Structure formats: C-alpha cells, structure tokens
C-alpha cells in the first residue's frame, strides 16, 4: 500500500558477522574486545539499534548487558558452543 512505511514490520538482525568472519547470534558464547579479550554471551538484541546485547562474564562482568557492535566481537568463545537461552555458560 502507498501509505505503509518502508521499514514497517522489519525485525532487527538476529545474527551478525563479526571480526573473525564467523556468524554469531543470540545464545552464542563470544570473545569481546574490552581492552583485552573477554568472554561474554549474546543474550538479546537491542530493539532500538538492532545490535547484539552481550552479558560479559568473569572479572569484567556488569549488571546489565552491553550493546556492542559486531566490530567489538572478536569471534566465538574458545569452547565454540552455543550457550543456549536459560543455561549458564561455564567459564573455564
């Protein structure tokens, strides 16, 4: 229809191509660049920008997930597995 907005109904990205060239998505354990490589899990998508929300783990952990660009995500975490929603990711 002529009066529909062009972007109406378009969902934000659910996967992204990151620095390593890998495709990652919600639930993936990843390594992020926070000055040094840090482990995190993509836990959701930022609805306003369509960027990944990453819950950082370990010493650099934060209370809230961080909005990150694909250029800040180095690749999948060394264990390479999908964390899966609702299942904690083991550091190690």
Image: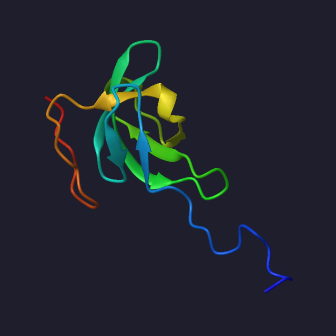
Query: How far across and how far down the image is residue 17, in percent?
Result: 41, 38
Q: Relative to 62, is 44 above or below?
A: below
How many callouts does the rendering have?
0
Query: How far across and how far down the image is residue 8, in percent?
Result: 70, 73
Q: Residue at x 32, y 30 (%)?
A: 75
Q: What's the colour scheme? A: rainbow
Query: How far across and how far down the image is residue 31, in percent?
Result: 32, 28
Q: Relative to 45, is 24 above or below?
A: above
Q: Residue furthest top?
A: 35
Q: Residue at x 44, y 56 (%)?
A: 14
On the picture, is 57 further left or further right than 52? Answer: left
Report which quarter residue 55 is drawn in. Answer: top left
On the picture, is 45 further left or further right than 29? Answer: right
> Which quadrant does the N terminus fall into?
bottom right
Q: Residue at x 21, y 49 (%)?
A: 82
Between 24 and 38, the one nearer to me in the picture: 24
On the picture, is 59 further left or further right than 72? Answer: left
Report which quarter residue 19 is drawn in. Answer: top left
Query: How far across and how far down the image is residue 53, in percent?
Result: 49, 46
């Amino acid at each position: 229809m002529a009066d529909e907005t062009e972007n109406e109904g378009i969902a934000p990205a659910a996967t992204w191509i990151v620095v390593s060239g890998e495709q990652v998505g919600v639930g993936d354990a990843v390594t992020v660049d926070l000055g040094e490589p840090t482990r995190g899990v993509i836990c959701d998508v930022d609805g306003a920008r369509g960027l990944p929300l990453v819950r950082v783990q370990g010493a650099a952990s934060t209370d809230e997930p961080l909005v990150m660009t694909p250029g800040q995500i180095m690749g999948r975490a060394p264990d390479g597995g999908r964390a899966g929603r609702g299942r904690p990711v083991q550091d190690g």
